[in-house]
Image: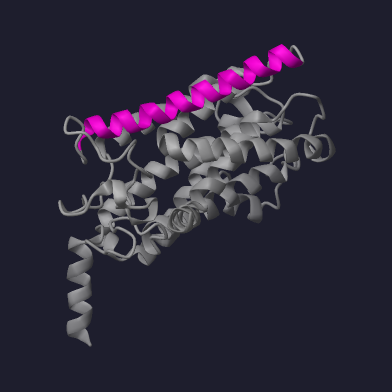
């Protein structure tokens, strides 16, 4: 028994991310911290205020909130959502955002690392290799940045506020850098030379951090696992998103003489395109169009300030989450269609 314990301890010291469930409380707490910071961004950035100064304070007595009263999730529960000094009740939305981000970060960790739902590091039923825990942790971090930005953008848009470009900038930068450093099919392997990628379905292709390669087979000047491939894949996704959103603006301007797709929505769609690549971006835009038709009537009933402005950014963010979570089933649908049609 003690020998097994020593083995696992030494193995954990060398390969800590091969024990993903050990890190689940840490990831949950990181999500809570991210949610606390996201509350600051949501309340200040649309108004053009600094997120660094002044420190968090009560809006009634204007006294700064002490460190022990600013612990994510815990402080709200211990103080029953009130200011320690004047007793002002804080909005439950602050607690909701912290709890949601903590749960979402932990769920993303299970999805990407512990359960590896997308089978990253393998190729469908043809298992060539399995990605290391440290590689999957990098994939999680890459997706966590997008999750943070899209959650904040959706909440800002739902509250009828502008989504500042400086808030979306981290997702744009991280998407480009991550795609360059982790091109398809990293951390998975390339198909063997005797396998023609053009004959494989999306489901049979190696699953990597990037969802799909831009086309098949890859040309000799754009080999797999090359930074150029990652950059081209992300840029094609961004171009498709830009073209579709600008086309939607032009169509609305010709028909109802209105431009509902704001610059923030275009930047948000571009960031999602960078992460998804052009194939998943097309599916994402179709999902977003359906959600937009559902959100517009609901927004007037449960939104803070009912109005006629289309919640395009919120629709794009929700649709991105749906496509990402449903990606294994989307691959199954594509493989079924190619088999029988």
254 magenta-colored: yes
Image mark count: 0
> 149 or 234: nearer the eye?
234
Q: Quadrant of residue 182?
A: top left
Task: Identify the residue at horizontal 52%, vertical 53% (top origin).
Answer: 326
> 325 or 142: nearer the eye?
325
Relative side of 290 to 182, left or right: right
Hey, which residue is sitting farthest bottom in the picture? 1
* x then y, percent, for residue 198: 29, 46
Task: Identify the residue at horizontal 38%, vertical 50% (top origin).
Answer: 202
State whether the magenta stretch is mostly helix, strand or loop.
helix
* x then y, percent, for residue 196: 23, 49
46 up-or-down from 19: above or below: above
Hey, which residue is sitting farthest front in the picture? 341
Q: What stretch of residues is rendered in magenta?
A: 226-255
16 magenta-colored: no
> 169 or 210: nearer the eye?
210
* x then y, percent, for residue 76: 64, 50
Q: Quadrant of residue 6?
A: bottom left
Task: Identify the residue at horizontal 59%, vertical 38% (top origin).
Answer: 286
Task: Identify the residue at horizontal 25%, vertical 36% (top origin).
Answer: 181
**Residue 258 appearing in the image:** no
* x then y, percent, for residue 148: 50, 39
């Amino acid at each position: 028994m003690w020998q097994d314990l020593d083995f696992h301890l030494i193995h954990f010291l060398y390969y800590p991310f091969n024990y993903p469930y050990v890190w689940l409380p840490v990831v949950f707490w990181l999500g809570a911290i991210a949610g606390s910071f996201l509350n600051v961004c949501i309340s200040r950035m649309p108004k053009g205020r600094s997120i660094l100064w002044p420190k968090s304070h009560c809006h009634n007595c204007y006294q700064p909130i002490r460190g022990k009263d600013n612990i994510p999730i815990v402080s709200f529960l211990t103080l029953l959502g009130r200011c320690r000094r004047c007793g002002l009740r804080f909005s439950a939305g602050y607690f909701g955002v912290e709890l949601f981000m903590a749960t979402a970060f932990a769920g993303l960790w299970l999805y990407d690392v512990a359960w590896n739902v997308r089978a990253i590091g393998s190729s469908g039923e043809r298992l060539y290799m399995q990605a290391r825990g440290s590689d999957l942790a990098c994939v999680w971090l890459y997706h966590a940045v997008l999750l943070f930005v899209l959650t904040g953008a959706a909440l800002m848009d739902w509250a009828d506020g502008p989504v500042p470009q400086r808030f979306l900038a981290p997702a744009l930068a991280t998407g480009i850098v991550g795609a360059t450093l982790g091109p398809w099919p990293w951390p998975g392997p390339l198909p063997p030379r005797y396998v023609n990628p053009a004959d494989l379905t999306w489901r049979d292709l190696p699953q990597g951090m990037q969802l799909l390669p831009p086309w098949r087979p890859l040309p000799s000047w754009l080999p797999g696992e090359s930074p150029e491939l990652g950059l081209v894949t992300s840029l094609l996704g961004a171009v498709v998103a830009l073209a579709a959103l600008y086309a939607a603006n032009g169509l609305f301007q010709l028909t109802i003489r209105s431009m509902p797709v704001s610059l923030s929505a275009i930047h948000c769609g571009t960031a999602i395109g960078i992460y998804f690549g052009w194939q998943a971006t097309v599916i994402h835009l179709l999902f977003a169009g359906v959600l937009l038709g559902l959100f517009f009537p609901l927004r007037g009933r449960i939104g803070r300030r009912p109005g006629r402005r289309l919640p395009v950014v919120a629709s794009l963010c929700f649709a991105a989450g749906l496509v990402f979570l449903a990606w294994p089933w989307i691959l199954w649908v594509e493989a079924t269609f190619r088999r029988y049609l």
